[in-house]
Image (cartoon, rainbow, N blue to C red):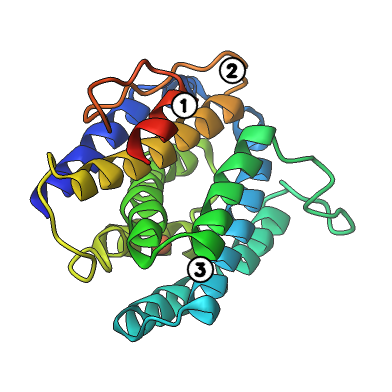
Amino acid sequence: MQWLLGLAEEYRNRLGDGHFYKELALSSKPEHIRGWIRQLYYQSRDFTSALSLRYAMCRDQDFQGCFALHAMEEVDHCEQLIDWMHKHGFLESDESPTSVPATLETIAVSAYCFRSVLRESSAHQVIALNLISEGVSYDFFSKVNPKLEALGPKVGRYWQVHKEIDQKHLAMGLDLIPQCAPDSPLGKTYARIAWEMATLYGRMLDSWGGILKHHNVEPSILPDESIQGSSISRELAVR
Ligand SMILES: [Fe+2]
């Protein structure tokens, strides 16, 4: 579904223009990135857990292989990040990675992923956890890795692996979900999921850059022409 890949890329590009990446470009010493590194721990931990849970919960044979492979390829990422944080002074040897609390926006991204796994269809999970999550992740590591190298901390396996495989992960499962046109009822539902997930990532990145007031991503494909912009009317429009 080329149109859905294109829509996801459009949303990702808008996140790429956001405050977080502007701040990243201005970072000139490791202290400037300390705040979001601690948030990345939560994102890494919960996303890896959501992928494992997705596989464990999956009763749909068509998706089991895909979900197993994805979970397996991510399974030790959080431990790799913790090792890297210790090695480069972002975490003291006796310090818990949770000594800095997660922002509510970081929690909201994880909550959406867990909810998708627990309550939604395999198609919903593919759009939320692969197409958008892995796409956002690929963009993130593509931009962050060169900056980290410029600031000094050596980019370890955790960072390199993401850059290498997240591009593959973003399209995983897309061929398995029911195919549809963008203007079909199902297409509009797909577009809504992509927009919801991208919006939550945008808010998460804003919170990592210290932004409290969010610049929202406007939906490119509306679920219904009668939509007035509120999330409640949007929800009602697709039911
Ligand atoms: Fe990934």
Q: Nearer the viewer, residue 57 or 33?
A: 57
- Determine the residue positioned at 32% across, 64% down: 169
**Badge 2 amino acid:** Ile
* Residue 57 visible, this orientation: yes
> Which SS class for mark 1?
helix
Instruction: Give whichever of 67, 95 is nearer the camera.
Output: 67
Give left or right: position of 218 versus 232: left
Q: Residue at x 52, y 24 (%)?
A: 27
Whole-angstrom CA distance, mark 1 to mark 2, is: 21 Å
Q: Is mark 1 within 8 Å of ligand 1?
A: no
The residue sitting at the right extreme is 94
Q: Earlier in the sequence, mark 1 or mark 2?
A: 2
**64, above or below 15, in the image:** below
Residue at 90% from the left image edge and 58% from the top image edge? 94
Q: Is 14 above or below relative to 135?
A: above
User: Residue under circle 1?
Assistant: 231
Badge 3: residue crowd in 10 Å (few <14, some 14–19, many ≥20): many
Q: Nearer the viewer, residue 192 or 239?
A: 239
Q: Residue tagged by mark 3?
A: 51
